[in-house]
Image (cartoon, rainbow, N blue to C red):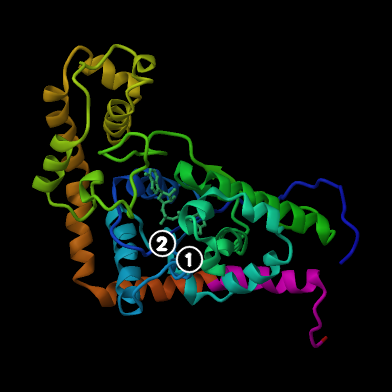
Amino acid sequence: MTAMTDEIVQYSGPERVFSGVQPTGNLHLGNYLGALKKFVTLQDSHDCLFCVVDLHAITMPYDAGQMKNNTRQIAAAFLAAGLKPDRAVIFAQSSVSAHTELCWYFNCVARMGWLERMTQFKDKAGKDKERASVGIFDYPVLQAADILAYKATHVPVGEDQKQHLELSRDIADRFNREFNAPGFFPLPEPLIKGPGARIMSLKDGSKKMSKSDPSDLSRINLTDDADTMARKIKKAKTDPEPLPASMDELSERPEARNLVGIYAALKGCEDQAVLDEFSGQGFGAFKPALAEVVIESLAPVTKQYNEWLAEPDAIDEVLAKGGEQAAAIANPVVAEVRDIIGFWRKG
Ligand code: TYM
């Protein structure tokens, strides 16, 4: 390795968007608002890649017999949400070996201390971290490799991914400096802001809506039918107070704030606009209105999702073509990385 450089040279390549979703079960409203809905908007303005991150999904116990279908399900959800294969590259992570190769190089750039600070590892490994897979510890390094294999500059994600994105920036910066390759990798920017970045559980406003919550009533799945969605909203935890006139007055009412946030995110308006409409009304009035908006927004997605799932060959075609397009971008980047690192190759 050569001496570190302090020179700061900005990345000057084109803007590119990358994001990933794990094939680990049903997608929910949090995934839709925090990620998928943003992906769909970005495909019109940016060069985009959206990846089913199956390599990440094997860091926790999983069923190998289900993996292929789980991958197809996420691809189907991307397509149902509105992604178009002629506008965005849709592919499976494991079909492009550049991810794992770059991950190894980054393993030698990232520091143990950086990974030990990752809160997601602490949450997922639980108390018994001795028994956690090395993969779950290394998860955020693979995430950095996903993004940087494409020199992606922007990464739309929910708020829970903020720390992982900071790590990706640290890895990119350290690589550029350690190998005297100023500006080689961009420092990818998270696109988190906006409504829907942090959708909370319907049962506990202090916990995020999550695939792994044991209670199905805590989340709205994209596969739920209209009656189930309405029932879950009806049963959502709230309080007896009516909705106030300003968001400040919701600071101690996390469940109420969450429901207002969901309504605003789906309608594409400010939280305050929702209060302007419902201030003074109780949840007896607000919940049915919310259920209507949720159903109206998700029903077409659910319908298309089921239609795509009935055509697994069509999904496979999208993934296969996407894999080729992704590899055509990532392979030359990784070849350059090999040269920068100084590996032998036949001249
Ligand atoms: P995953 O599959 O856990 O989550 C997929 C996306 O959904 C967002 N999300 C939420 N947004 C708002 N409210 C919620 N309650 C909520 N729950 C989940 C997540 O922030 C994410 O954007 N580590 C990533 C997968 C990944 C990735 C990448 C992302 C792997 N490599 C490279 C971006 C770039 C994850 O958590 O996926």
Q: Position of residue 278 (x, y in %)?
A: 21, 18
**Was residue 337 drawn as part of the magenta stretch in this picture?**
yes
Q: Residue at x 11, y 24 (%)?
A: 284
Q: Looking at the magenta stretch, what is its main secondary structure? A: helix
Q: Quadrant of residue 282?
A: top left
Magenta segment boundaries in residue numbering? 327-346
Q: Which residue is mark 2?
A: 22
**Can you say which quadrant of the picture contains the N terminus?**
bottom right
What is the secondary structure assignment of the residue under circle 1? helix
Q: Which residue is mark 1?
A: 56
Q: Is residue 176 above or below residue 275?
A: below
Contact (Cβ within 8 Å) of mark 2 with mark 1: yes
Q: Residue at x 31, y 51 (%)?
A: 213
Q: Considering depth in this image, is 110 or 178 the residue closer to the camera? A: 110
Q: Is residue 91 above or below residue 159?
A: below
The amino acid beneath tag 2 is Gln
